[in-house]
Image: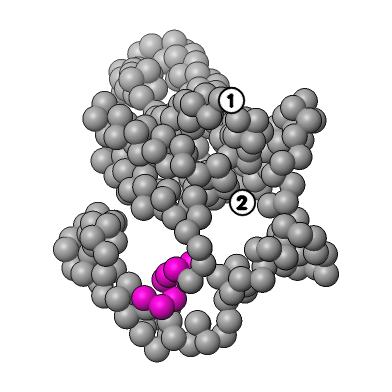
Amino acid sequence: WYQRRVRGSHLAGNVLGGLLAVSSFFYNHSESTRVQWIPPLRESFSFPLLLLQTLLLSRTLRNGPTKSRLACLFLATLATVLPWQFCPFALFTQVLSLFAAHTLFRLDHITFVLDTVCSAFLVGAVLQFFNPMLISSLYLASYVALRALVWWRSKQNDLVGNLLTLSWRLLGEKNPTKEGTTKDANKIIKKNSTKKSSSLTTPVTVRSVLEDGIVFVTLTALYKVTSGYLLQLSDDAHIFNILRAKFTSYGDFHTMLYTCSPAFDFIGAESFLKLTLTLLLPV
C-alpha cells in the first residue's frame, strides 16, 4: 500500500492522489491480489521491484534524467530481471506504453530511459549466463524497434530543420536591404542550431501514427523471428501457446497447467461489477 500511495502522489502531483490510490486498493483488495491463491512463483519476488521500476521510470520522464535517477532506474530494472526469467514480457508491455506515448506526445527524454533499462536488461542476461530467452525476447525486439524509430524521426527532423535554415539563409541573401527579414532568418537559424531535442517538433498526424505503428511492428517481428531462428530457440513457445489456448480449443500440458488456475482465467463479470460499485471504474 505504501508503494501505491507514493505512485499515486507522484502521478497526481499531490497527496490526495496517493490517498485515493490507497483507498481504491483497500476497497478492491480481493480483485487486486488474484495471484495470492496460487503457489509462490518467481514473479512474486519481482513484482514489487517492477512497481518500483515503473515509478522511477515515470519520475525520470517527468522530471528529466539525472545521474542519480538513471542509476536508480538501472538498479531497479536489474533487480527485477534477475529473479524472473519471464520479466521481458512485462517490460515488453512497458515498451508498448512508451511507444504509444512517444507516438502521440513525442517524449523528450525517452532515449535516456530506453537505453538505461536496456543496459540493465543486458547486464541481467549476462549474469544469467547469456540466457538465450532474454536475447531473443519480445522486450529486446521492441526496444530495438522503438530505438530505431526514435532515431529515424530525429534524423527526419534534422533534415527538415536544415532545409528550413537553408531557405531562410537564401531569403536573407536575396533581400539584404530588408533588415527585418535578415533578423528573422538569424533568429530561426539560431533556434534550430541550439535546439537540444528535435523530437518535440515532429508533427503528430494520423499518417505519422500509422507510419510509426507499421515500422514498430515490422521491426519487432523481424528481430524476434530472426533471433529465434539464429539461436534455434523455442523455449518461450509455451507462452504464446497459452495465449492461443485462451482464444481457441488448443491445449497441451503447459497450457492446461496454467489455465486450470482461476488466477489465469478471464476476468468475470462479477469483478467488473465490484470495481464499479466501489467507484474505481467510474473514477
Q: Secondary structure at mark 2?
A: helix
Q: Horizontal placement of 54 versus 237: left or right? A: left
Q: Which residues are magenta?
A: 29-36
Q: Nearer the viewer, residue 271 or 20?
A: 271
Q: Residue at x 53, y 29 (%)?
A: 128
As drawn, 258 above or below 220? below
Quadrant of residue 156 within the rendered picture: top right
Q: Residue 130 bears which disc, if any?
A: 1
Answer whether labels 2 and 1 touch (C-beta < 8 Å): no
Q: Horizontal placement of 216 versus 197: left or right? A: right
Q: Horizontal placement of 227 versus 123: left or right? A: right
Q: Residue at x 42, y 42 (%)?
A: 80
As measured in the structure, the alpha-carbon distance from the residue carrying label 2 to the one carrying label 1 is 41 Å
| Labels 2 and 1: the sequence-earlier one | 1
Q: Amino acid at mark 2?
A: Val
Q: Residue at x 72, y 57 (%)?
A: 254
170 in the magenta segment: no
Q: Secondary structure at mark 1?
A: loop
Q: Nearer the viewer, residue 272 or 14?
A: 272
Q: Position of residue 11 (x, y in %)?
A: 29, 56
Dominant SS type (magenta): helix
34 in the magenta segment: yes
Quadrant of residue 112 within the rendered picture: top left
Q: Position of residue 110 (x, y in %)?
A: 43, 36
Q: Is residue 94 visible?
A: yes
Provide the residue designation for mark 2: 206
